[in-house]
Image (cartoon, coloured by chain):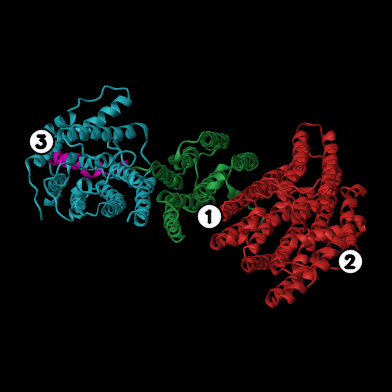
Chain colours: A green, B cyan, C red
């Protein structure tokens, strides 16, 4: 028997790996869109084993709209605005980032296995592993790259990872649409604000390289 | 050692060997289609082989017997590879416990002699090509051995044929589909690397400096070149069959039906290679290790997940 | 209608975006007054208690709300005259974001649902970001980028912590609404391992926002680069909101019987913050950064006080009130200094007493207050925390605590004395000081002074009930 959810999780892991080695900003944005859609589908697939729920499906559509279209769309415009299209000389190299990704998955499997989650099914365990790995990889991107856009993408990836962990742990939240909607709204506004700041950074510094910003320190 | 020699297996082996050059034609056709051309005839590779075999060989005076040995060994090892392969779920000609290791060492042996032959010419270009080839294959080898280990975990067997035909056959339709999915992508990357296809290497390139595999065989001519070409076809066939077997379990019951599906999937795999060659440019040389390491990372993810979740 | 406290500022804020500057200023003041009125109504429970699925009025929330509302009125009065002076082209944006920011912070104070609280805290980050980079200088952009990114990441970790807490409930097969009030009722049945993990993540997350070391790195940049009214609001109101998030979880831990664990975590983070700010304050060359580090120190003091509990918890709550008043006053004075001298460098702002007597006075008085001199409230609150720590037998903590206080006082006083009393040969005042801008900081200081002489009974009761759940009391 095949678990569709497992395939989805494998797709997420794939997108995580690819984003760690990618040096093109546009490719990263496309990966983000892909990852957003897959991440949105995970709760749907996990829950529909008990029957299809109309609300859940509508919310899935909303999530896809936001994570798969709206946010990547904003990022797409941001990349179009700035002149640079690729990450040059990352703080941590691509091979090292990939390696860090490997360590991340070992770590997440280790953590998941030591949580004594007896009540967890295998899919949920895998969900947990994927969530932690995605979150960790997002953090790696945040720290290892210079371009502000890549850092935003790292943040979004981290957010996706946390969403997955939330799906594994706090099933109750996913039935409270008001709360989920509020979280989603926050995410959109966050990307908007970051986008505006990014645009200003690009105007002022003629680049989105965060290492150019080193005026403030003690 | 258990030599399961049957007519069916032998026939399937012969069919595969005979069809190997045809599939290379598929790639050329797909590329031609995307370029909006008519492309060479389907049997182009057969014509090329016949042409080469009818020629004589030219040897540089500075070469030794190693140079002549290279093509022969690489051809023979590639042919031997196919002996172990369960085409379309049929039992292979040769199979024994632990043959997977032999298999990949055979591959290594073939490559070793090609490299030696290249170095024997003392041409700086060929030395450069050899260095690149060895570097990239060494990286790809890491992936392959993790895959072997992973399949051992999944199927509990160390025989290549058992991977696909045993009780716990490994394929995309089994319980561990998610992992196989990752492996498939990794294996495809290895396929592209080992067979010097785009985006790792461009078989159509004309500049020695940018070549990897082609530059090593610049000095070979006539029948020697034909042997090397055939070896390359077999190697490609081997990897494509590997991918095909993961894509579909050949358990439909009727062997003939299995064979037909198998070759359809094979055609698709070759077509995908052609498709990738048509739509992507080759990577800069320093991006290639990154590409290959991604495949390693993928199978590494998969094996970590199996270690914990598949008991 | 408790929700009005955040609905009105948000609606007003959106309106200000589109209104002309003059009307926008009126709306700003009007909303500040309305907000204070609603808060007063809630404070005296005129509208009755509210227990909605997402919101409720808790004593600690009301305390933070009251401080914020009071501060906002004076800060908005100051803003009007400050903005008129600097002639900022983006003033409508600034005023609108001030109001949106107030709305988001008010939402934090009344949020009861765990995730709603998170949403509100994240909203405060996003709404305050435009306040910091409104001038669009290189430095302010850098500060904003650090602020948004570090805080967003930190708060994302807090979301993880929230999920852990929710899971600790599902693990024990309890199904109650995921709000702090209903979770406290079943706290002793929650899974302690997950609760602890959740608490750690929440302290890291909201602690980032609160400026606890070592997650404080954004704070000196953001607080020093923001225009002064925004700095005052960030230091005086926002830090309290973040603290409220941590405090709510601490309460939950306490009712789950894990109070010792969470107390130790808070004390550790608090002392670390005090040490870090003590080290960095010594060699400051920028007076706004100096004030920012002082905010980190004071947040550390509050964390330590809450962690120690008992008498110290009362001290911590008092400290929160007085720190907000005095630090906002200091930032407003700093705004006047910046206008007057046109620089944030300590070396170039000498002889303040002669050039700007009103500002010099309020800045000096504020500094005395923040260093813990009577007749300002911090004197009492720090004394209570030290007494509480000695009572609780935490001698190591109290030693480090006092050591840091002395170090910070020594470091900061050298700089402040230089600013106020040193001779300045030059006599160029870019912008003369006015009462409109000098009065708000003085009023805030006077309030702190008044509260030490006469603590209203309702305030006293509110503090008492806010800290009773973690075993805090004024009666030793």
Task: Please provide percent x and percent y for residue A32.
Answer: 49, 40
Residue linked to disc 2 = C375
The quadrant in which the C terminus of chain A is found is: bottom right
CA separation in Å, label 3 and label 2:
105 Å
Q: Earlier in the sequence, mark 2 or mark 1?
A: 1
Chain letter belonging to callout 3: B
Q: Which residues are magenta?
A: B209-234
Residue linked to disc 1 = C173
The one nearer the camera, A143 or C31, is C31
In the picture, residue C396 is in which quadrant? bottom right
Q: Residues within 10 Å of mark 1 (few under 14, many from 20)?
A: few
Chain letter belonging to callout 1: C
C-beta proximity under 8 Å, tags 3 and 2: no
Query: Nearer the viewer's eye, disc 3 or disc 2?
Result: 2
Which mark, by number, is residue B120?
Answer: none
C-beta proximity under 8 Å, tags 2 and 1: no
Q: Is residue B306 left or right of residue A196?
A: left
The quadrant in which the N terminus of chain A is found is: top left
Residue linked to disc 3 = B53
CA separation in Å, label 2 and label 1:
53 Å
Task: Please provide percent x and percent y for residue C428.
Answer: 88, 51
Task: Please provide percent x and percent y for residue C113.
Answer: 65, 49
Q: Is residue B159 above or below residue B257?
A: below
Query: Nearer the viewer's eye, disc 3 or disc 1?
Result: 1
Residue B147 visible to the viewer: yes
In the picture, residue B41 is in which quadrant? top left
- Could you tell me which secondary element the residue under label 1 belongs to? loop
Residue B61 visible to the viewer: no
Q: Residues within 10 Å of mark 2 (few under 14, many from 20)?
A: some
Q: Is residue C97 left or right of residue B172?
A: right
């Amino acid at each position: 028997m095949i678990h569709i959810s497992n395939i989805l999780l494998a797709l997420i892991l794939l997108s995580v790996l690819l984003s760690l080695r990618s040096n093109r900003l546009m490719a990263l944005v496309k990966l983000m869109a892909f990852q957003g859609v897959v991440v949105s589908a995970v709760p749907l697939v996990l829950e529909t084993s008990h029957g299809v729920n109309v609300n859940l499906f509508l919310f899935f559509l909303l999530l896809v709209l936001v994570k798969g279209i709206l946010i990547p769309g904003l990022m797409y415009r941001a990349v179009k605005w700035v002149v640079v299209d690729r990450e040059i000389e990352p703080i941590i190299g691509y091979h090292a980032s990939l390696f860090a990704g490997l360590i991340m998955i070992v770590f997440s499997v280790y953590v998941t296995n030591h949580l004594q989650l007896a009540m967890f099914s295998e899919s949920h365990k895998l969900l947990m592993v994927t969530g932690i790995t995605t979150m960790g990889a997002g953090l790696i991107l945040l720290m290892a790259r210079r371009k502000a856009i890549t850092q935003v993408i790292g943040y979004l990836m981290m957010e996706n990872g946390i969403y997955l962990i939330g799906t594994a742990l706090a099933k109750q939240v996913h039935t409270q649409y008001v709360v989920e909607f509020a979280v989603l709204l926050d995410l959109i506004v966050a990307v908007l604000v970051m986008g505006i700041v990014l645009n200003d950074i690009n105007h002022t510094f003629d680049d989105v390289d965060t290492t150019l910003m080193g005026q403030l320190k003690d | 050692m258990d030599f399961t020699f049957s007519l069916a297996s032998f026939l399937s082996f012969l069919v595969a060997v005979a069809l190997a050059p045809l599939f290379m034609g598929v790639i050329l056709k797909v590329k031609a289609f995307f370029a909006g051309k008519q492309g060479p005839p389907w049997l182009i590779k057969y014509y090329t082989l016949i042409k080469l075999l009818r020629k004589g060989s030219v040897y540089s005076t500075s070469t030794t017997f190693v140079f002549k040995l290279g093509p022969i060994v690489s051809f023979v090892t590639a042919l031997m590879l196919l002996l172990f392969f369960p085409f379309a779920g049929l039992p292979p000609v040769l199979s024994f416990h632990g043959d997977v290791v032999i298999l990949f060492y055979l591959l290594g042996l073939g490559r070793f002699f090609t490299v030696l032959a290249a170095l024997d010419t003392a041409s700086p270009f060929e030395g450069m090509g050899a260095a690149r080839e060895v570097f990239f294959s060494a990286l790809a080898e890491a992936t392959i051995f993790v895959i072997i280990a992973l399949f051992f975990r999944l199927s509990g067997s160390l025989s290549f044929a058992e991977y696909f035909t045993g009780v716990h056959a490994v394929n995309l339709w089994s319980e561990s589909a998610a992992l196989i999915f990752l492996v498939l992508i990794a294996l495809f990357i290895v396929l592209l690397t080992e067979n010097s296809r785009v985006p790792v290497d461009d078989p159509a390139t004309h500049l020695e400096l940018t070549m990897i595999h082609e530059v090593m065989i610049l000095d070979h001519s006539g029948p020697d070149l034909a042997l090397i070409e055939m070896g390359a076809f077999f190697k490609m066939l081997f990897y494509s069959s590997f991918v095909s077997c993961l894509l579909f379990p050949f358990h439909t019951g009727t062997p003939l039906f299995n064979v037909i599906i198998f070759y359809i999937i094979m055609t698709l795999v070759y077509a995908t290679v052609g498709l990738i060659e048509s739509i992507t440019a080759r990577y800069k040389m320093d991006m290639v290790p990154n590409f290959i390491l991604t495949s390693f990372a993928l199978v590494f993810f998969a094996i970590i997940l199996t270690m914990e979740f598949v008991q | 209608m408790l929700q009005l406290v955040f609905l009105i500022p948000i609606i007003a804020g959106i309106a200000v975006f589109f209104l002309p500057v003059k009307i926008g200023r009126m709306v700003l003041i009007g909303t500040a007054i309305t907000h204070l009125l609603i808060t007063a109504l809630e404070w005296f429970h005129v509208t009755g208690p509210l227990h909605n699925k997402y919101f409720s009025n808790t004593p600690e929330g009301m305390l933070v709300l009251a401080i914020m509302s009071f501060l906002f009125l004076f800060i908005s009065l100051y803003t009007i005259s400050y903005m008129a002076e600097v002639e900022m082209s983006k003033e409508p944006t600034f005023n609108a974001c001030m109001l949106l920011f107030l709305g988001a912070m008010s939402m934090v104070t009344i949020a009861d649902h765990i995730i709603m609280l998170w949403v509100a805290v994240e909203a405060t980050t996003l709404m305050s970001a435009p306040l910091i980079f409104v001038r669009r200088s290189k430095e302010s952009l850098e500060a904003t980028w650090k602020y948004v990114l570090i805080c967003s990441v930190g708060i994302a970790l807090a979301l993880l912590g929230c999920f852990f807490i929710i899971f600790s409930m599902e693990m024990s097969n309890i199904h109650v609404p995921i709000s702090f009030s209903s979770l406290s009722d079943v706290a002793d049945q929650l899974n302690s391992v997950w609760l602890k993990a959740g608490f750690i993540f929440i302290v890291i997350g909201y602690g980032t926002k609160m400026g606890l070391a070592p997650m404080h790195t954004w704070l000196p940049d953001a607080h020093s680069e923001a225009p002064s009214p925004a700095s005052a609001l960030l230091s005086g109101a926002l830090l309290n909101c973040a603290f409220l998030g941590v405090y709510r979880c601490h309460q939950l831990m306490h009712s789950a019987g894990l109070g010792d664990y969470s107390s130790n975590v808070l004390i550790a983070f608090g002392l670390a913050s005090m040490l870090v700010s003590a080290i960095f304050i010594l060699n400051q060359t920028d007076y706004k950064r100096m004030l920012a580090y002082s905010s980190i120190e004071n947040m550390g003091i509050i964390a330590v006080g809450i962690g120690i509990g008992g008498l110290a918890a009362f001290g911590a709550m008092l400290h929160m009130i007085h720190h907000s008043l005095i630090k906002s006053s200091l930032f407003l004075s700093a705004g006047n200094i910046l206008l007057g001298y046109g620089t944030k460098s300590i070396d170039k702002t000498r002889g303040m007493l002669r050039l700007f007597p009103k500002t010099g006075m309020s800045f000096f008085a504020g500094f005395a207050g923040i260093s813990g001199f009577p007749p300002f409230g911090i004197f009492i609150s720090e004394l209570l925390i030290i007494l509480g720590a000695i009572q609780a037998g935490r001698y190591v903590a109290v030693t480090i605590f006092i050591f840091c206080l002395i170090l910070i006082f020594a470091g900061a006083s050298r700089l402040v004395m230089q600013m106020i009393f040193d001779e300045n040969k030059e006599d160029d005042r870019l912008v003369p000081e006015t009462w409109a801008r000098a009065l708000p900081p003085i009023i805030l200081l006077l309030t702190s002074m008044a509260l030490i002489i006469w603590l209203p009974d309702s305030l006293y009761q509110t503090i008492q009930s806010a800290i009773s759940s973690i075993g805090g009391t004024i009666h030793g």
